[in-house]
Amino acid sequence: MTTDHKTMSCEVFQSQLSDLVGSGADVHNHPHIQECEICRELYEQLQTIAEAAKQLFPDQEPEDKLWERIESAIKDEDGISNHD
């Protein structure tokens, strides 16, 4: 079943909104957003919330020794499985 984006209901659009935003789709230019003020406002609110959430959990660099510990754990695991 295909949905005509120009006649898409608010209910259908809103049920797909988080997937659209998460996929990186160009939601701002979506035909429904262009025609529906209610959904446009909802989208703008979600964008504001998403930006605020990014500030709560900024990207962090892993510890310097992380990859060494991962490599060591893999080698240890391989050593255990090779002795079975």
Image (cartoon, rainbow, N blue to C red):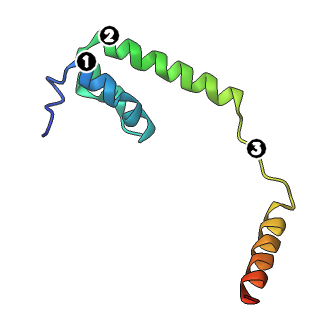
Q: Where is residue 52 shown, x and y percent of the image?
A: 62, 22
- Would you place residue 51 above or below residue 77 in this image? above
Q: Give the mark toward the camera: 2 or 1.
A: 1
Q: Amino acid at mark 3?
A: Gln
Q: Earlier in the sequence, mark 2 or mark 1?
A: 1
- The residue nearer to you, when weighing 39 against 75, is 75
**Marker disc for residue 32:** none
Q: What residue appears at the point 75 percent right and 74 percent down from the top-left corner?
A: 74
What number is the disc on residue 38? Answer: 2
Where disc 1 sits, the SS reads: helix
Give the vertical position of 78 relative to 27 (above or below): below
Q: Is residue 13 left or right of residue 76?
A: left
Residue 5 place in picture, x, y as percent: 18, 29
Quickly name the residue at label 3.
60
Please, is residue 67 above or below residue 8 in the view? Answer: below
Q: CA distance from mark 3 to mark 1?
A: 37 Å
To which residue does mark 1 refer? 10
